[in-house]
């Protein structure tokens, strides 16, 4: 670098650029740089953040399976609520535990005895054919 001086500004600029290139979120870099908004950071350094965009897309893609798992957990929670409200299946206290009674997708009624009420609720929530009814919410 003949004729160029290393200044604190040059070091700061290089550090901010590297952080964006390494995929750090722009809002974190902007905050740490002391910029009043991410628009300032984007205007000054946005041209070098193509790699950051790719890294961000990769990170988001990696989270999608976990997000889907949470959505399924929410659906299961909704089904459990319907069982407890008596809108899906039935649960009876019997000697030896709790009998879950449900109707499967073929219209056949089935039953099974479980040790705990919660296990019976979960079983009906997973197997009751009516669990996907839209009027349940």
Image: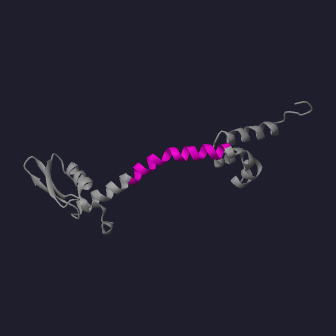
Q: Quadrant of residue 16?
A: top right
Is residue 5 in the magenta section? no
Residue at the extreme front: 106
Name which residue lies at 68% across and 43% down: 20
Q: Is residue 93 left or right of residue 84?
A: left
- Looking at the rendered image, the quarter that the C terminus falls into is bottom left
Residue at the extreme left: 95
- Looking at the rendered image, the quarter that the N terminus falls into is top right
Name which residue lies at 49% across and 46% down: 63
Is residue 63 in the magenta section? yes
Main secondary structure of the magenta stretch: helix
Is residue 42 among what the camera can see?
Answer: yes
Front residue (pair 98, 30): 98
Is residue 37 among what the camera can see?
Answer: no
Q: Specify the color scheme.
A: one colour
The x and y percentages for residue 118 are 22, 50
- In the image, which residues are magenta? 51-71
28 above or below 90? above
Q: Is residue 3 left or right of residue 32?
A: right
125 above or below 5? below
Q: Is residue 34 left or right of residue 92?
A: right
Front residue (pair 101, 34): 101
Name which residue lies at 45% across and 50% down: 67
Q: Quadrant of residue 132?
A: bottom left
72 above or below 4? below
Name which residue lies at 25% across and 51% down: 122
Residue at the extreme bottom: 135
Q: How many marks?
A: 0
The x and y percentages for residue 66 are 44, 46
Residue at the extreme top: 2
The x and y percentages for residue 58 are 57, 44
The x and y percentages for residue 51 are 67, 43
């Amino acid at each position: 670098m003949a004729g160029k001086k290393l200044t604190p500004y040059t070091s700061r600029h290089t550090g901010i650029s590297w952080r964006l290139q390494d995929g750090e979120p722009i809002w974190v870099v902007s905050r740490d740089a002391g910029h009043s908004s991410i628009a300032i950071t984007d205007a000054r350094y946005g041209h070098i953040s193509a790699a950051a965009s790719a890294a961000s897309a990769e990170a988001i893609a990696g989270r999608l399976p976990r997000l889907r798992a949470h959505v399924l957990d929410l659906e299961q929670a909704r089904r459990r609520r319907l069982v407890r409200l008596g809108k899906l299946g039935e649960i009876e206290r019997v000697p030896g535990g709790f009998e879950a009674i449900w109707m499967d997708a073929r219209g056949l009624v089935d039953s099974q005895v479980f040790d705990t009420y919660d296990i019976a609720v979960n079983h009906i929530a997973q197997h009751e054919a009516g669990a996907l009814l839209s009027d349940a919410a």
